[in-house]
Structure formats: C-alpha cells, structure tokens
Image (cartoon, helix red, strand yellow):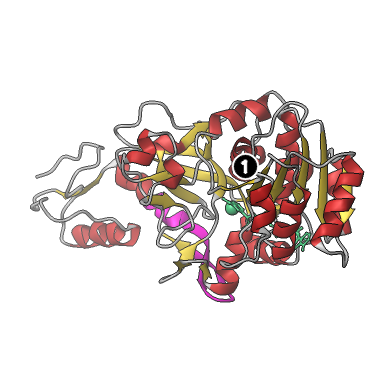
Amino acid sequence: MSLLCGRLCPGDVGVKGINTTQPCVKDSREIKRALIETTLKGGRAYLSQFWIERAAMSEQSNLSVVAHGPGDLRMERLPIPEPGPNEVQLQMNSVGICGSDVHYWQHGRLGSFLMQKPMVLGHEGSGTVTKVGLEVKHLQVGDRVAIEPAYPLNNDEFCKSGRYNLSPAMFCSATPPHHGQLSQFYVHSANYCFKLPDCVSSEEGAFIEPLSVAIHACRRARVKLGSKILICGAGPIGLLNLLVAKAMGAAQVVICDLSSARLAKAKEVGADFTIKVEKETPQDLAQKVQAALGSMPFTTIECTGAEFCVQAAVYSTQSGGTVLLVGHGPELVSVPLLNAAIREVDIRGMFRYCNTYPMAIAMLASKKVDVKPLITHHFPLSQAIEAFETTKKQLGIKVMLKCD
Ligand code: NAD
Ligand code: ZN
C-alpha cells in the first residue's frame, strides 16, 4: 500500500492494495486513466499534490515558437520542462526577436550552426521563476530575472581567465542543438539568471542580452571619456553601441546607415551626427566622417558586416586607434590591411559577451542607459509569426513578444 507523501518520488500514483513500484505516471491523461481503471477495479486511488499540480500544468501546455527548417515557422504546444537541481523553471515574460532568430527561420542555419531538428527560437528573454531546483540558493519562486542565454559547460582555461564566451563547449539558447526561450515556460541554469530590481521592467530585462553585446563591444573597442566614435549600422546593435558609448563617456558619435528611418532613430537617441550611405567609396565615407567630427575617430565600431563598411572603418579610424568588428558578414572579406598595418590601427573581433549582466542591470536601474525608445513593436506570443514578419521587413528596431 502506498500513502502518498506529496513529494516527487517514483511510483507516485499510488493505488491502495496495488504494488506502487510501478514507473512514474507523468501525463495527466495517464493519471486520469489510472484513476478510472483503479476505481473500476474497486480500488481507492491516492494522488500526490505534486502530480495534481503537474497534471494541471501539462493541461495548460507550453505554447512555443518552433523553426522546422528554411521558411517553416510554427506555433506548437510542447511539454512544460522541469528544472534540474541547478536550474530554474521560468514563466517567460518578454522575449526580443534577434536577427539570428530570423536567420534560423529563413535559412535553417547561422554560419556553421546548422539546425538538425526543429528548434524553439529566442535568446533575448526575461522570466519569472516558477520552480527552483534543489541546489538553487539565490533565487526564489516569484523572482523576475534576465536570462544570460550562453554559458560554458566546463570550467576550462577560458572560464578561469574570465573570458567564458570563448569556451568551445557552450550552452546557448536557440543555437543548435539547444532550444530557445520563445515559450510560455522555459528552464535555464540558475547561475545565469539575474534577478531584476522592481525599477527594471521585464522588457528592459529582455533587452539586456543585446545590450550586453554593446557593453562587450565598447569594452573591447576601448571606448573612453572624450572618445570620438564612428558606428557603422543603426540596427539594434549599432544603436545600443551608441547608447553605451555615450554612457561610457564618448564625446561625439557619428553613425552611418543606408536607412533614413534608422538614422532618424539614431538622432532621436543621441547620435551627434548621422551619415546616409549612398554610392560613395569607403574613402569618401571616411572623408565625410572626418568632416562631421572635425577629426578622425579614435574608435570605429562596425555593426553591419558589410564589406564596404569594414573597409570604410579602416580608412576612417585615426592612426593608433581601434576598429572593432561586431557585424557578421561573409567569411572572406577584402580589407585594406596595409593601410591599417602602417598606421597601427588595431582590428579587433568580439564574440557575444561575458560578465556583462550585472553591469547592464545597474545601467538600466540607474537610468544611465534608456533602451525603451528602441522597443518599437510589441506582440503577444500567439502572434509570433506576425512579429517575425515585422522583424524580417526591418519595420522597426526591436520587436518584443510578451509570453505571459
Ligand atoms: P540589423 O541587420 O538590424 O542592422 C544592420 C544595419 O546595417 C541595418 O540598419 C542596415 O541598413 C545597415 N547596413 C547594411 N549594409 C550597410 C552598408 N553598406 N552601409 C551602411 N549601413 C549598412 O542587425 P543588428 O541586429 O543591428 O546586428 C548588427 C550585426 O551585428 C549583425 O551582423 C549581427 O549578426 C551582428 N552581431 C554580432 C554579435 C557578436 O557577438 N559579434 C552579436 C550580435 C549581433
Ligand atoms: Zn541576438
């Protein structure tokens, strides 16, 4: 006989007089069937509180945005995931759509990351803790958190030196083979969930992911007090770099793009100068940048991936300065390397970010950075397909989905 304890344990559908070493019954329909069969056999059934709650949850199910292959995006109901010992289960609040999500939807791959099976999209999210794993000490049910989507799986030499983003073995939400966050419920490593203060909204919390890219970029680009800066590209990443560079003390920022609408947004959020790229050569663009700033910028942050901009970045940057490559373009790009070499212009790369979430939360809480003007569209999760179409057409800057 089993008297059920109300805790998770094997054989938790207990039936009076029946051996309870049977395997766990995990599905609400199975639980109901077991109860009916037991009743029909004249037995009495006991169901633990855990399974009653679990049955209710699985009946709610987990609406998710799933990419199946190039051009094939579906809304599907998936099982609600349970947290492991060091994980938390989150009811997702807000998730921003990133260009890479659109890329997986359109092409089924991103560079060398190839989708081998259907994948839930989304890696710019915030959520509310609904369950905590047994080992989790710093979070409680009800806490609102920002989710750092990429974390190292081993404590390797890169982790030890503080550059865990370079670790070869990473978990990353919505990077194959790992599912992303565009679901009602999602499970994540508790160590990479950061509690949000009340003064930081869930949408701002979701924006911490791309904001982290900009913080890491400005650190790598050596932005400092009084810097003059060129930013190529006024998409979400270029605009966030503008906000962070200003917060880090940049004196003047000029930003260039092909899109007048995006340059208007750049002006609205603090760009000192904007340049609409037309048909000029990279050297011509460098001249325009110098004319706008009154001297060559010490730092250029390239956020387009376009070969033209990589070339213009080198020609524009002052001798001894830094070109930071944020944008992802083709593998092979023609770069005026000798020009950079003989003028000691450092060309640096970057990959995602590390150790940025606490700083980003502090910047948002203290209003040093205001990302809200960059959130131009809001959709409920049920309208995710429309939200993805909006992002693909570049109709705004950041499109946010509300999952709760
Ligand atoms: P986005 O596509 O929304 O914005 C890119 C902008 O560049 C657009 O506004 C576009 O009009 C502009 N552009 C394109 N070609 C141009 C040209 N020839 N001249 C001037 N402007 C041009 O992308 P995003 O979300 O802002 O991301 C920017 C880049 O950063 C992408 O390549 C993305 O893959 C990359 N990224 C890199 C990292 C990293 O870790 N290094 C992280 C996130 C994003
Ligand atoms: Zn992204």
Is there any visible trace of residue 370 in the rendered image?
no
Which residue is identified by label 1? 217
- Is ligand 1 less than 8 Å from the beta carbon at label 1? yes
Residue 235 sits above or below residue 212 on the image: below
The residue at the point 41 percent across, 35 percent down is: 191
* Location of residue 29 with respect to 232 vertically, above or below: below
Query: Hey, what amino acid is under mark 1?
Result: Ala
Which residue, as the protein is rendered here, is positioned at the far top?
Answer: 366
- Which residues fall within the magenta stretch? 55-76
Residue 173 in picture, x, y percent from top left: 47, 53
The relative height of residue 179 versus residue 245 in the rendered view (above or below) is below
Quadrant in the picture for residue 53: top left
Is residue 161 among what the camera can see? yes
The residue at the far front in this view is: 342
Indicate the quadrant containing the N terminus: top left, top right, bottom left or bottom right.
Answer: top left
- Residue at the image point whose x is 90% and y is 39% from the top: 294
